[in-house]
Image (cartoon, coloured by chain):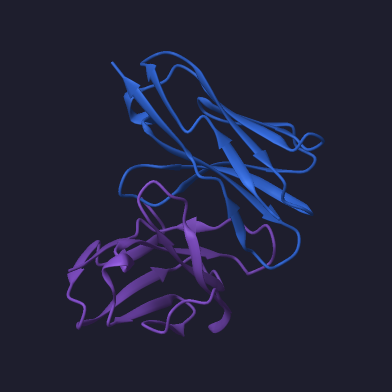
Amino acid sequence: DTEVTQTPKHLVMGMTNKKSLKCEQHMGHRAMYWYKQKAKKPPELMFVYSYEKLSINESVPSRFSPECPNSSLLNLHLHALQPEDSALYLCASSQTEGAGQPQHFGDGTRLSIL
Amino acid sequence: KNQVEQSPQSLIILEGKNCTLQCNYTVSPFSNLRWYKQDTGRGPVSLTIMTFSENTKSNGRYTATLDADTKQSSLHITASQLSDSASYICVVSAQRGGNKLVFGAGTILRVKS
């Protein structure tokens, strides 16, 4: 079982909806990540939070809005998404954001945009 | 440019057979290399992690090798099982730039009976 928990596992939404993806870890990790993964492609980094502060935004469109309410939780708020945003969204965590720290991945949220 | 290339793109083998997956990288300065297994619809799970000074690391039927001079790694799977069917992703981490990972495109392995 994964130590990084993501909810929901599946999400179908229309382009005008607002929804949120949630990620939780209780390993005491202080760095958390959002990735987007299209079918048969490797994950692409979207955001990195370090000690609850946004550290990296990989030029992600503003229709994706991350939030880190505390050290265990990471949210991704979605609004006015496009069909091409349909993908598997993975959350990961590591002890810190230091180079080489192993990242532990959740099982992802499969997002489908109608 | 930091890159990771994997081969083959896909592979089909019979249950019980061995196979070897390849990974070449140009990430510099090198920190570590990991092999992840990703089942369909699941998140990646770490199999092995190796630093510059490590040549080989095993995890059950999985054995990874690293040649830091030629910047090559391999993942050898022994006595394959149907549950080994998955995507295997080689991931390299640099010593600078925070903890951003450089992912290979993965090798899709299918084990059939």
Q: Using the image, determine if residue A88 lies above or below residue A50.
A: above
Residue found at x 56% / y 73%: A30
Picture quadrant where residue B2 is located: bottom right
The image position of residue A98, as x and y in percent, is 68, 67
User: Drawn colour of chain B?
Assistant: blue
Drawn side of residue B85 relative to residue A18, left or right: right
The image position of residue B3, as x and y in percent, is 65, 49
The image position of residue B5, as x and y in percent, is 60, 41
Q: Using the image, determine if residue A70 lies above or below residue B26.
A: below
Residue nearer the viewer, B36 or A102: B36
Residue found at x 78% / y 43%: B52
Drawn side of residue A18 relative to residue B56, left or right: left
Picture quadrant where residue A55 is located: bottom right
Q: Using the image, determine if residue B110 lies above or below residue B39.
A: above
Residue found at x 71% / y 67%: B97
Residue found at x 56% / y 71%: A31
* Chain appearing in purple on the rendered image: A
The image position of residue B6, as x and y in percent, is 57, 37
Residue nearer the viewer, B108 or B49: B108
| Image mark count | 0
Residue nearer the viewer, B50 or A111: A111
